[in-house]
Protein backbone atom coordinates (compact mmCIF):
# COMPACT_ATOMS: atom_id res chain seq x y z
CA UNK A 1 0.00 0.00 0.00
CA UNK A 2 2.65 2.49 -1.00
CA UNK A 3 0.00 4.90 -2.23
CA UNK A 4 -1.36 5.52 1.23
CA UNK A 5 -0.82 9.16 1.98
CA UNK A 6 0.19 8.28 5.51
CA UNK A 7 3.23 6.29 4.36
CA UNK A 8 6.12 8.77 4.13
CA UNK A 9 8.85 7.91 1.67
CA UNK A 10 12.47 8.10 2.44
CA UNK A 11 14.18 7.17 -0.82
CA UNK A 12 15.61 3.74 -0.06
CA UNK A 13 19.33 3.31 -0.59
CA UNK A 14 20.66 1.31 -3.51
CA UNK A 15 18.67 3.16 -6.16
CA UNK A 16 21.74 4.36 -8.04
CA UNK A 17 20.91 2.02 -10.89
CA UNK A 18 17.46 3.59 -11.23
CA UNK A 19 18.88 7.10 -11.22
CA UNK A 20 21.41 6.10 -13.88
CA UNK A 21 18.64 4.57 -15.97
CA UNK A 22 16.57 7.76 -15.79
CA UNK A 23 19.57 9.90 -16.71
CA UNK A 24 20.45 7.59 -19.61
CA UNK A 25 16.95 7.66 -21.05
CA UNK A 26 16.84 11.47 -20.91
CA UNK A 27 20.34 11.91 -22.35
CA UNK A 28 19.72 9.36 -25.12
CA UNK A 29 16.44 11.02 -26.13
CA UNK A 30 18.02 14.48 -26.14
CA UNK A 31 21.00 13.12 -28.06
CA UNK A 32 18.79 11.52 -30.72
CA UNK A 33 16.93 14.81 -31.07
CA UNK A 34 20.19 16.75 -31.47
CA UNK A 35 21.41 14.23 -34.04
CA UNK A 36 18.22 14.44 -36.13
CA UNK A 37 18.38 18.24 -35.90
CA UNK A 38 21.90 18.18 -37.36
CA UNK A 39 23.67 19.66 -34.30
CA UNK A 40 26.01 16.70 -33.92
CA UNK A 41 26.92 16.52 -37.62
CA UNK A 42 28.17 19.96 -38.71
CA UNK A 43 29.26 18.58 -42.09
CA UNK A 44 25.81 17.40 -43.10
CA UNK A 45 24.36 19.47 -45.94
CA UNK A 46 21.43 21.39 -44.48
CA UNK A 47 19.28 24.22 -45.84
CA UNK A 48 21.12 26.49 -43.38
CA UNK A 49 24.55 25.63 -44.82
CA UNK A 50 23.33 25.95 -48.40
CA UNK A 51 21.93 29.43 -47.80
CA UNK A 52 25.00 30.45 -45.76
CA UNK A 53 27.13 29.51 -48.76
CA UNK A 54 24.94 31.63 -51.06
CA UNK A 55 25.60 34.53 -48.67
CA UNK A 56 29.33 33.78 -48.61
CA UNK A 57 29.40 33.97 -52.40
CA UNK A 58 27.33 37.10 -52.95
CA UNK A 59 27.24 38.93 -49.61
CA UNK A 60 24.28 39.39 -47.31
CA UNK A 61 21.61 41.80 -48.50
CA UNK A 62 18.99 42.14 -45.81
CA UNK A 63 15.40 41.79 -46.94
CA UNK A 64 16.34 40.22 -50.28
CA UNK A 65 16.11 36.65 -51.54
CA UNK A 66 19.41 34.80 -51.04
CA UNK A 67 19.46 33.80 -54.71
CA UNK A 68 17.88 35.47 -57.73
CA UNK A 69 17.94 38.58 -55.54
CA UNK A 70 17.51 41.09 -58.36
CA UNK A 71 14.16 41.05 -60.06
CA UNK A 72 10.77 42.63 -60.69
CA UNK A 73 7.21 41.65 -59.90
CA UNK A 74 4.71 40.90 -62.65
CA UNK A 75 1.10 39.83 -62.76
CA UNK A 76 -1.49 38.63 -65.24
CA UNK A 77 -3.28 35.38 -65.92
CA UNK A 78 -3.11 31.97 -67.55
CA UNK A 79 -5.65 31.00 -70.20
CA UNK A 80 -5.87 27.22 -70.28
CA UNK A 81 -7.06 25.63 -73.52
CA UNK A 82 -7.92 22.34 -71.80
CA UNK A 83 -5.34 20.28 -73.70
CA UNK A 84 -3.46 19.20 -70.53
CA UNK A 85 -6.67 17.94 -68.86
CA UNK A 86 -6.12 14.52 -70.38
CA UNK A 87 -2.96 14.19 -68.28
CA UNK A 88 -3.72 16.09 -65.08
CA UNK A 89 -6.76 16.67 -62.91
CA UNK A 90 -5.33 20.05 -61.79
CA UNK A 91 -8.02 22.71 -61.98
CA UNK A 92 -5.54 25.08 -63.67
CA UNK A 93 -5.63 22.87 -66.79
CA UNK A 94 -9.40 22.95 -67.26
CA UNK A 95 -10.43 25.44 -69.96
CA UNK A 96 -10.55 28.89 -68.37
CA UNK A 97 -8.56 31.62 -66.73
CA UNK A 98 -6.35 31.47 -63.60
CA UNK A 99 -4.83 34.62 -62.05
CA UNK A 100 -1.04 34.68 -61.82
CA UNK A 101 1.46 36.63 -59.72
CA UNK A 102 5.06 36.29 -60.83
CA UNK A 103 8.58 37.55 -60.83
CA UNK A 104 11.41 37.90 -63.34
CA UNK A 105 14.94 37.82 -61.95
CA UNK A 106 18.58 37.13 -62.63
CA UNK A 107 20.57 34.50 -60.73
CA UNK A 108 22.89 35.40 -57.88
CA UNK A 109 22.50 36.84 -54.42
CA UNK A 110 23.44 40.44 -55.24
CA UNK A 111 20.34 42.60 -55.84
CA UNK A 112 22.52 45.30 -57.46
CA UNK A 113 24.32 43.07 -59.98
CA UNK A 114 24.39 44.29 -63.59
CA UNK A 115 21.77 42.67 -65.82
CA UNK A 116 24.53 41.76 -68.26
CA UNK A 117 26.57 39.94 -65.59
CA UNK A 118 24.86 36.59 -66.24
CA UNK A 119 23.33 35.08 -69.39
CA UNK A 120 20.48 33.52 -67.42
CA UNK A 121 17.06 34.99 -66.57
CA UNK A 122 14.37 33.38 -64.47
CA UNK A 123 10.58 33.42 -64.36
CA UNK A 124 8.74 32.47 -61.19
CA UNK A 125 4.96 32.11 -61.13
CA UNK A 126 2.20 31.52 -58.62
CA UNK A 127 -1.08 30.35 -60.13
CA UNK A 128 -3.96 30.95 -57.69
CA UNK A 129 -6.54 28.28 -58.52
CA UNK A 130 -10.23 28.93 -57.91
CA UNK A 131 -10.37 25.97 -55.45
CA UNK A 132 -7.79 27.69 -53.21
CA UNK A 133 -4.91 25.43 -54.23
CA UNK A 134 -1.77 26.93 -55.72
CA UNK A 135 0.82 26.06 -58.30
CA UNK A 136 4.18 27.70 -57.77
CA UNK A 137 7.02 27.26 -60.21
CA UNK A 138 10.48 28.77 -60.65
CA UNK A 139 11.91 28.41 -64.14
CA UNK A 140 15.20 29.38 -65.78
CA UNK A 141 16.10 30.46 -69.31
CA UNK A 142 18.25 27.42 -70.01
CA UNK A 143 17.28 23.90 -71.02
CA UNK A 144 19.40 22.06 -68.42
CA UNK A 145 20.68 22.75 -64.92
CA UNK A 146 24.45 22.56 -64.33
CA UNK A 147 24.23 19.75 -61.79
CA UNK A 148 21.77 17.09 -60.73
CA UNK A 149 22.08 16.90 -56.95
CA UNK A 150 22.05 19.32 -53.99
CA UNK A 151 25.52 18.09 -52.97
CA UNK A 152 26.95 18.95 -56.40
CA UNK A 153 25.21 22.33 -56.33
CA UNK A 154 26.76 23.04 -52.93
CA UNK A 155 30.19 21.97 -54.24
CA UNK A 156 29.70 24.32 -57.20
CA UNK A 157 28.87 27.22 -54.88
CA UNK A 158 31.96 26.47 -52.78
CA UNK A 159 34.18 26.25 -55.86
CA UNK A 160 32.89 29.54 -57.28
CA UNK A 161 33.07 31.55 -54.03
CA UNK A 162 35.02 34.76 -54.70
CA UNK A 163 38.38 34.83 -52.93
CA UNK A 164 39.22 37.65 -50.55
CA UNK A 165 42.33 38.57 -52.56
CA UNK A 166 40.81 39.02 -56.03
CA UNK A 167 37.10 39.27 -55.40
CA UNK A 168 36.74 36.58 -58.06
CA UNK A 169 36.47 32.79 -57.92
CA UNK A 170 39.74 30.87 -57.84
CA UNK A 171 40.12 29.51 -61.43
CA UNK A 172 41.94 26.44 -60.14
CA UNK A 173 39.05 25.50 -57.88
CA UNK A 174 36.52 26.19 -60.62
CA UNK A 175 38.42 23.99 -63.09
CA UNK A 176 38.73 21.25 -60.48
CA UNK A 177 34.99 21.37 -59.85
CA UNK A 178 34.09 21.02 -63.52
CA UNK A 179 36.65 18.25 -63.97
CA UNK A 180 35.09 16.36 -61.07
CA UNK A 181 31.54 16.94 -62.37
CA UNK A 182 31.20 15.76 -65.98
CA UNK A 183 27.41 16.05 -65.67
CA UNK A 184 27.91 19.82 -66.10
CA UNK A 185 28.84 19.18 -69.79
CA UNK A 186 25.44 19.99 -71.38
CA UNK A 187 25.07 23.17 -69.29
CA UNK A 188 28.61 24.32 -70.15
CA UNK A 189 27.95 23.68 -73.85
CA UNK A 190 24.82 25.84 -73.57
CA UNK A 191 26.50 28.64 -71.61
CA UNK A 192 29.35 28.95 -74.15
CA UNK A 193 26.90 30.28 -76.76
CA UNK A 194 24.50 32.03 -74.38
CA UNK A 195 24.37 35.82 -74.27
CA UNK A 196 22.62 37.98 -71.70
CA UNK A 197 19.30 38.84 -73.31
CA UNK A 198 18.13 42.44 -73.59
CA UNK A 199 14.65 41.49 -72.41
CA UNK A 200 12.85 39.17 -70.06
CA UNK A 201 10.03 38.97 -72.60
CA UNK A 202 11.96 37.21 -75.35
CA UNK A 203 13.24 34.29 -73.30
CA UNK A 204 12.05 30.71 -72.95
CA UNK A 205 11.86 29.47 -69.36
CA UNK A 206 12.34 25.79 -68.52
CA UNK A 207 11.10 23.98 -65.40
CA UNK A 208 14.41 22.05 -65.43
CA UNK A 209 13.15 19.60 -62.80
CA UNK A 210 10.71 16.87 -63.73
CA UNK A 211 7.23 16.67 -62.22
CA UNK A 212 4.46 14.09 -62.25
CA UNK A 213 0.97 14.81 -63.59
CA UNK A 214 -1.89 12.60 -62.43
CA UNK A 215 -4.87 12.07 -64.71
CA UNK A 216 -8.48 11.30 -63.79
CA UNK A 217 -7.77 7.53 -63.88
CA UNK A 218 -4.91 8.03 -61.44
CA UNK A 219 -2.29 7.35 -64.11
CA UNK A 220 0.99 9.20 -63.58
CA UNK A 221 2.82 11.05 -66.35
CA UNK A 222 6.39 12.36 -65.90
CA UNK A 223 6.75 15.80 -67.46
CA UNK A 224 8.88 18.89 -67.76
CA UNK A 225 7.48 22.20 -68.93
CA UNK A 226 8.58 25.46 -70.44
CA UNK A 227 7.20 28.88 -71.23
CA UNK A 228 7.83 29.82 -74.87
CA UNK A 229 7.72 33.57 -75.59
CA UNK A 230 5.56 35.28 -78.18
CA UNK A 231 8.04 38.16 -78.41
CA UNK A 232 11.17 37.73 -80.54
CA UNK A 233 14.56 39.13 -79.55
CA UNK A 234 15.59 41.90 -81.89
CA UNK A 235 17.82 44.19 -79.91
CA UNK A 236 21.53 43.71 -79.63
CA UNK A 237 22.74 43.60 -76.05
CA UNK A 238 25.69 45.82 -76.98
CA UNK A 239 23.26 48.74 -77.20
CA UNK A 240 22.71 48.39 -73.50
CA UNK A 241 26.30 48.93 -72.51
CA UNK A 242 26.62 51.15 -69.47
CA UNK A 243 23.09 50.49 -68.21
CA UNK A 244 23.05 47.95 -65.40
CA UNK A 245 19.26 47.81 -65.02
CA UNK A 246 17.93 47.57 -68.55
CA UNK A 247 15.75 44.50 -68.01
CA UNK A 248 13.20 46.18 -65.73
CA UNK A 249 13.04 49.26 -67.99
CA UNK A 250 12.58 47.08 -71.08
CA UNK A 251 9.73 45.19 -69.43
CA UNK A 252 7.97 48.41 -68.37
CA UNK A 253 8.30 49.76 -71.91
CA UNK A 254 6.95 46.57 -73.51
CA UNK A 255 4.02 46.30 -71.09
CA UNK A 256 3.09 49.92 -71.79
CA UNK A 257 2.56 48.79 -75.38
CA UNK A 258 0.58 45.70 -74.44
CA UNK A 259 0.55 42.40 -72.54
CA UNK A 260 3.36 39.91 -73.08
CA UNK A 261 2.57 36.28 -73.85
CA UNK A 262 4.11 32.85 -73.42
CA UNK A 263 2.82 29.44 -74.44
CA UNK A 264 2.97 26.78 -71.73
CA UNK A 265 4.43 23.68 -73.34
CA UNK A 266 4.36 20.45 -71.33
CA UNK A 267 6.73 17.72 -72.49
CA UNK A 268 5.92 14.09 -71.65
CA UNK A 269 8.78 11.75 -70.81
CA UNK A 270 9.30 8.54 -72.71
CA UNK A 271 9.94 5.48 -70.58
CA UNK A 272 13.55 5.66 -69.46
CA UNK A 273 13.95 9.43 -69.73
CA UNK A 274 15.73 10.67 -66.59
CA UNK A 275 13.30 12.33 -64.18
CA UNK A 276 15.86 12.49 -61.37
CA UNK A 277 18.59 14.49 -63.10
CA UNK A 278 18.02 18.10 -64.17
CA UNK A 279 21.48 18.19 -65.77
CA UNK A 280 20.25 15.90 -68.56
CA UNK A 281 17.94 17.19 -71.29
CA UNK A 282 15.30 14.93 -72.79
CA UNK A 283 15.50 14.30 -76.56
CA UNK A 284 13.77 16.93 -78.72
CA UNK A 285 11.25 14.53 -80.26
CA UNK A 286 9.27 14.00 -77.05
CA UNK A 287 5.52 14.55 -77.17
CA UNK A 288 4.72 18.13 -76.22
CA UNK A 289 1.32 19.55 -75.30
CA UNK A 290 0.46 23.21 -75.74
CA UNK A 291 -1.52 23.76 -72.52
CA UNK A 292 -2.43 27.42 -72.86
CA UNK A 293 -1.20 30.99 -72.78
CA UNK A 294 0.43 32.96 -69.99
CA UNK A 295 -0.41 36.64 -70.29
CA UNK A 296 1.49 39.19 -68.20
CA UNK A 297 0.15 42.73 -68.28
CA UNK A 298 1.57 44.46 -65.22
CA UNK A 299 4.93 45.03 -63.55
CA UNK A 300 5.88 46.55 -60.20
CA UNK A 301 9.18 47.00 -58.38
CA UNK A 302 9.91 44.07 -56.09
CA UNK A 303 10.37 46.35 -53.02
CA UNK A 304 6.62 46.61 -52.57
CA UNK A 305 5.13 44.55 -55.40
CA UNK A 306 2.85 41.56 -55.02
CA UNK A 307 5.66 39.05 -55.54
CA UNK A 308 7.83 40.33 -52.70
CA UNK A 309 6.41 38.10 -49.99
CA UNK A 310 5.90 35.02 -52.14
CA UNK A 311 8.27 32.08 -51.71
CA UNK A 312 8.25 30.47 -55.17
CA UNK A 313 8.72 27.00 -53.67
CA UNK A 314 8.50 24.54 -56.60
CA UNK A 315 6.83 21.95 -54.37
CA UNK A 316 3.76 24.08 -53.63
CA UNK A 317 1.59 22.18 -56.10
CA UNK A 318 -2.11 21.62 -56.72
CA UNK A 319 -3.86 18.26 -56.81
CA UNK A 320 -2.89 16.74 -60.19
CA UNK A 321 0.73 17.95 -60.18
CA UNK A 322 3.37 16.41 -57.90
CA UNK A 323 7.13 16.48 -57.52
CA UNK A 324 9.22 13.77 -59.19
CA UNK A 325 12.19 11.84 -57.83
CA UNK A 326 14.43 14.77 -58.84
CA UNK A 327 16.58 15.37 -55.70
CA UNK A 328 16.93 19.08 -56.47
CA UNK A 329 13.22 19.69 -55.83
CA UNK A 330 13.29 18.94 -52.10
CA UNK A 331 16.55 20.87 -51.75
CA UNK A 332 15.07 23.91 -53.50
CA UNK A 333 11.98 23.71 -51.31
CA UNK A 334 14.08 23.45 -48.13
CA UNK A 335 16.56 26.18 -49.07
CA UNK A 336 13.85 28.58 -50.31
CA UNK A 337 12.05 28.18 -46.98
CA UNK A 338 15.26 29.06 -45.14
CA UNK A 339 15.88 32.10 -47.35
CA UNK A 340 12.24 33.16 -46.95
CA UNK A 341 12.49 33.03 -43.15
CA UNK A 342 15.70 35.10 -43.23
CA UNK A 343 14.32 37.84 -45.41
CA UNK A 344 10.91 38.04 -43.73
CA UNK A 345 12.69 38.17 -40.33
CA UNK A 346 14.73 41.09 -41.68
CA UNK A 347 11.60 42.81 -42.96
CA UNK A 348 10.11 42.33 -39.48
CA UNK A 349 13.30 43.77 -37.87
CA UNK A 350 13.47 40.81 -35.53
CA UNK A 351 16.37 40.90 -33.06
CA UNK A 352 19.56 39.36 -34.41
CA UNK A 353 18.77 39.96 -38.07
CA UNK A 354 20.86 42.23 -40.30
CA UNK A 355 19.34 45.69 -40.60
CA UNK A 356 17.31 45.97 -43.78
CA UNK A 357 18.36 49.63 -44.05
CA UNK A 358 21.86 48.45 -44.86
CA UNK A 359 20.70 47.77 -48.38
CA UNK A 360 21.18 51.47 -49.25
CA UNK A 361 24.94 51.19 -48.67
CA UNK A 362 25.19 48.83 -51.61
CA UNK A 363 23.20 50.91 -54.02
CA UNK A 364 25.18 52.25 -56.94
CA UNK B 1 -11.58 9.42 -2.79
CA UNK B 2 -12.43 5.90 -3.93
CA UNK B 3 -9.46 3.66 -4.73
CA UNK B 4 -10.52 3.33 -8.39
CA UNK B 5 -10.13 7.06 -8.95
CA UNK B 6 -6.43 6.57 -8.34
CA UNK B 7 -6.03 5.55 -11.96
CA UNK B 8 -6.68 7.64 -15.02
CA UNK B 9 -9.82 6.53 -16.86
CA UNK B 10 -9.12 4.23 -19.85
CA UNK B 11 -9.96 6.95 -22.40
CA UNK B 12 -7.41 9.26 -20.78
CA UNK B 13 -4.76 6.53 -20.80
CA UNK B 14 -5.35 5.62 -24.45
CA UNK B 15 -5.22 9.30 -25.45
CA UNK B 16 -2.12 9.90 -23.33
CA UNK B 17 -0.04 7.16 -24.96
CA UNK B 18 -1.36 7.83 -28.45
CA UNK B 19 -0.56 11.53 -28.12
CA UNK B 20 2.82 10.73 -26.56
CA UNK B 21 3.79 8.68 -29.60
CA UNK B 22 2.39 11.23 -32.06
CA UNK B 23 3.97 14.25 -30.37
CA UNK B 24 7.38 12.63 -29.99
CA UNK B 25 7.21 11.62 -33.67
CA UNK B 26 6.13 15.16 -34.54
CA UNK B 27 9.04 16.76 -32.66
CA UNK B 28 11.59 14.54 -34.42
CA UNK B 29 9.91 15.03 -37.82
CA UNK B 30 9.90 18.79 -37.31
CA UNK B 31 13.51 19.14 -36.21
CA UNK B 32 14.63 16.68 -38.90
CA UNK B 33 12.80 18.20 -41.84
CA UNK B 34 14.20 21.71 -41.39
CA UNK B 35 17.72 20.25 -41.27
CA UNK B 36 17.37 18.18 -44.44
CA UNK B 37 17.79 18.97 -48.13
CA UNK B 38 17.14 15.38 -49.20
CA UNK B 39 13.92 13.87 -50.51
CA UNK B 40 13.09 13.26 -46.85
CA UNK B 41 12.40 16.97 -46.50
CA UNK B 42 9.39 16.85 -48.78
CA UNK B 43 7.66 13.80 -47.36
CA UNK B 44 8.41 14.85 -43.79
CA UNK B 45 6.77 18.24 -44.44
CA UNK B 46 3.77 16.51 -46.02
CA UNK B 47 3.53 14.20 -42.99
CA UNK B 48 4.06 17.00 -40.44
CA UNK B 49 0.97 19.01 -41.42
CA UNK B 50 -1.80 16.37 -41.20
CA UNK B 51 -0.14 14.87 -38.11
CA UNK B 52 -0.17 18.29 -36.44
CA UNK B 53 -3.87 18.77 -37.10
CA UNK B 54 -4.60 15.23 -35.87
CA UNK B 55 -2.74 16.07 -32.63
CA UNK B 56 -4.73 19.30 -32.27
CA UNK B 57 -8.02 17.39 -32.55
CA UNK B 58 -6.93 14.65 -30.13
CA UNK B 59 -5.67 17.20 -27.59
CA UNK B 60 -9.10 18.86 -27.64
CA UNK B 61 -10.67 15.43 -26.96
CA UNK B 62 -8.08 14.86 -24.22
CA UNK B 63 -8.98 18.18 -22.57
CA UNK B 64 -12.68 17.24 -22.58
CA UNK B 65 -11.93 13.78 -21.14
CA UNK B 66 -9.75 15.33 -18.43
CA UNK B 67 -12.36 17.94 -17.59
CA UNK B 68 -15.07 15.27 -17.22
CA UNK B 69 -12.77 12.81 -15.41
CA UNK B 70 -10.47 14.67 -13.02
CA UNK B 71 -7.10 12.93 -12.75
CA UNK B 72 -6.10 11.10 -9.55
CA UNK B 73 -4.61 13.32 -6.88
CA UNK B 74 -0.86 13.35 -6.43
CA UNK B 75 0.44 11.49 -3.34
CA UNK B 76 -0.19 13.61 -0.28
CA UNK B 77 3.39 13.21 0.88
CA UNK B 78 4.86 14.63 -2.32
CA UNK B 79 6.93 17.70 -1.40
CA UNK B 80 5.14 20.96 -2.18
CA UNK B 81 7.77 22.02 -4.68
CA UNK B 82 7.40 18.79 -6.64
CA UNK B 83 3.62 19.17 -6.61
CA UNK B 84 3.96 22.69 -7.94
CA UNK B 85 6.37 21.48 -10.66
CA UNK B 86 3.97 18.68 -11.60
CA UNK B 87 0.98 21.00 -11.92
CA UNK B 88 2.87 23.76 -13.70
CA UNK B 89 4.47 21.38 -16.19
CA UNK B 90 1.09 19.86 -17.01
CA UNK B 91 -0.46 23.25 -17.66
CA UNK B 92 2.55 24.01 -19.85
CA UNK B 93 2.20 20.71 -21.74
CA UNK B 94 -1.47 21.33 -22.49
CA UNK B 95 -0.76 24.90 -23.55
CA UNK B 96 2.05 23.79 -25.91
CA UNK B 97 0.09 20.85 -27.33
CA UNK B 98 -2.71 23.24 -28.31
CA UNK B 99 -0.53 26.21 -29.29
CA UNK B 100 1.96 24.44 -31.57
CA UNK B 101 -0.48 23.17 -34.21
CA UNK B 102 -2.36 26.48 -34.13
CA UNK B 103 0.85 28.51 -34.52
CA UNK B 104 1.95 26.22 -37.37
CA UNK B 105 -1.39 26.64 -39.11
CA UNK B 106 -1.34 30.43 -38.58
CA UNK B 107 2.28 30.62 -39.76
CA UNK B 108 1.50 28.92 -43.09
CA UNK B 109 -1.53 31.20 -43.46
CA UNK B 110 0.64 34.29 -42.83
CA UNK B 111 3.17 33.06 -45.40
CA UNK B 112 0.43 32.94 -48.04
CA UNK B 113 0.76 29.18 -48.42
CA UNK B 114 -2.27 27.01 -49.06
CA UNK B 115 -2.56 24.84 -45.92
CA UNK B 116 -2.70 21.42 -47.58
CA UNK B 117 -3.25 18.32 -45.45
CA UNK B 118 -3.13 16.06 -48.49
CA UNK B 119 -2.93 16.50 -52.26
CA UNK B 120 -6.42 18.00 -52.26
CA UNK B 121 -7.56 18.64 -48.67
CA UNK B 122 -7.01 22.29 -47.79
CA UNK B 123 -7.66 24.09 -44.51
CA UNK B 124 -8.82 27.72 -44.55
CA UNK B 125 -6.39 30.51 -43.76
CA UNK B 126 -6.53 31.65 -40.12
CA UNK B 127 -4.10 34.59 -40.19
CA UNK B 128 -3.65 37.64 -42.45
CA UNK B 129 -0.87 37.27 -45.03
CA UNK B 130 2.23 39.31 -44.26
CA UNK B 131 5.98 38.97 -43.77
CA UNK B 132 6.06 40.26 -40.17
CA UNK B 133 3.34 37.88 -39.01
CA UNK B 134 4.97 35.01 -40.84
CA UNK B 135 8.45 35.64 -39.42
CA UNK B 136 7.21 36.03 -35.82
CA UNK B 137 4.99 32.93 -36.01
CA UNK B 138 7.65 30.85 -37.75
CA UNK B 139 10.21 31.61 -35.03
CA UNK B 140 7.57 31.11 -32.34
CA UNK B 141 6.81 27.67 -33.81
CA UNK B 142 10.46 26.65 -33.39
CA UNK B 143 10.85 28.05 -29.87
CA UNK B 144 7.60 26.55 -28.62
CA UNK B 145 8.62 23.20 -30.13
CA UNK B 146 11.98 23.30 -28.33
CA UNK B 147 10.18 24.24 -25.10
CA UNK B 148 7.79 21.32 -25.64
CA UNK B 149 10.71 18.96 -26.14
CA UNK B 150 12.38 20.15 -22.91
CA UNK B 151 9.07 19.90 -21.06
CA UNK B 152 8.60 16.41 -22.47
CA UNK B 153 12.07 15.41 -21.19
CA UNK B 154 11.19 16.71 -17.73
CA UNK B 155 7.86 14.85 -17.87
CA UNK B 156 9.65 11.64 -18.92
CA UNK B 157 12.25 11.97 -16.16
CA UNK B 158 9.58 12.74 -13.56
CA UNK B 159 7.46 9.76 -14.64
CA UNK B 160 10.45 7.44 -14.31
CA UNK B 161 11.32 9.03 -10.96
CA UNK B 162 7.81 8.25 -9.69
CA UNK B 163 7.92 4.75 -11.18
CA UNK B 164 11.45 3.68 -10.30
CA UNK B 165 12.52 5.75 -7.31
CA UNK B 166 9.41 6.72 -5.38
CA UNK B 167 7.24 3.83 -6.58
CA UNK B 168 4.23 5.80 -5.46
CA UNK B 169 1.69 4.73 -8.10
CA UNK B 170 1.86 7.95 -10.08
CA UNK B 171 3.40 6.27 -13.13
CA UNK B 172 1.21 3.18 -12.91
CA UNK B 173 -1.91 5.37 -12.74
CA UNK B 174 -1.24 6.03 -16.44
CA UNK B 175 -0.22 2.51 -17.49
CA UNK B 176 -2.25 -0.64 -18.15
CA UNK B 177 -1.46 -2.72 -15.16
CA UNK B 178 -0.63 -2.07 -11.54
CA UNK B 179 2.38 -3.78 -10.11
CA UNK B 180 1.42 -6.08 -7.26
CA UNK B 181 1.27 -4.06 -4.09
CA UNK B 182 0.67 -0.70 -5.81
CA UNK B 183 -3.07 -0.94 -5.50
CA UNK B 184 -4.73 -3.75 -3.62
CA UNK B 185 -8.19 -3.42 -5.06
CA UNK B 186 -7.26 -4.32 -8.63
Image (cartoon, grey):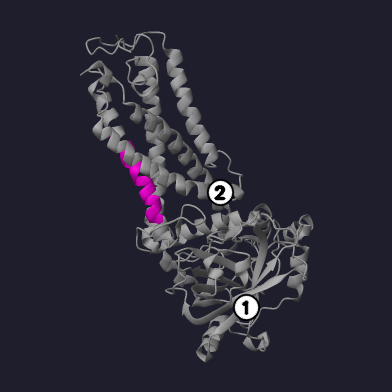
Q: Nearer the viewer, residue A147 or B121?
A: B121
> From this viewpoint, which residue is outermost toward the front?
A217
Q: Nearer the viewer, residue B125 or A203?
A: B125
Work out whether A179 lies above or below A297: above
x and y percentages locating residue A342 in the rendered image = 47, 58
x and y percentages locating residue A218 in the rendered image = 61, 56
Badge 2 is on which residue?
A: B43
Using the rendered view, name the quadrant where residue B154 is placed: top left
Contact (Cβ within 8 Å) of mark 1 with mark 2: no
Residues rendered magenta in the picture: B91-107
x and y percentages locating residue A276 in the rendered image = 69, 56
Q: How many marks?
A: 2
Does the magenta run of residues contain A263?
no
Q: Residue at x 34, y 30 (%)?
A: B11
Distance between mark 1 and mark 2 Cα atoms: 32 Å
Secondary structure at badge 2 equals helix
Secondary structure at badge 1 equals strand
Q: Residue at x 38, y 59 (%)?
A: B125
x and y percentages locating residue B108 in the rendered image = 42, 56
Q: Nearer the viewer, residue A76 or A337?
A: A76
Q: Residues within 10 Å of mark 1 (few under 14, many from 20)?
A: many
What mark, if any, has residue A263 been given in the picture? 1
Name the subunit of mark 1.
A
Magenta residues, dominant SS class: helix
Query: Image quadrant for the N terminus of chain A?
Result: top left
> From this viewpoint, which residue is outermost toward the bottom?
A257
Q: Is residue A251 among what the camera can see?
A: yes
Q: Nearer the viewer, residue A208 or B9?
A: B9
Amino acid sequence: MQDLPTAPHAPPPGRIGAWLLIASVVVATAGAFAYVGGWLTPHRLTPERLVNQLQDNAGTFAGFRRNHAKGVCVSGWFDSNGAAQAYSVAQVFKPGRTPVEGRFAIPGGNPYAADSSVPIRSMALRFALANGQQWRTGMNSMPVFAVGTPEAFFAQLQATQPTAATGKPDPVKVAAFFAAHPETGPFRAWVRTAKPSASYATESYWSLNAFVLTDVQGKRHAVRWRMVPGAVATEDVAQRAGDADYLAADLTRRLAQGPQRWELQITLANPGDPTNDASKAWPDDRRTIDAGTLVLDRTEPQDNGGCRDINFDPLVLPDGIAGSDDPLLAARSAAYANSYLRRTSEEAHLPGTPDARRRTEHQP
Amino acid sequence: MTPLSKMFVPAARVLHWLLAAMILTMLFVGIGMVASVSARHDWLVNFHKPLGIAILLLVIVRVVVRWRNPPPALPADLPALQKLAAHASHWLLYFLMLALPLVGWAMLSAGGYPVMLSASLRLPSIFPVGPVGFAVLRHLHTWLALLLFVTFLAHLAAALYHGLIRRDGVLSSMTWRRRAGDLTDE
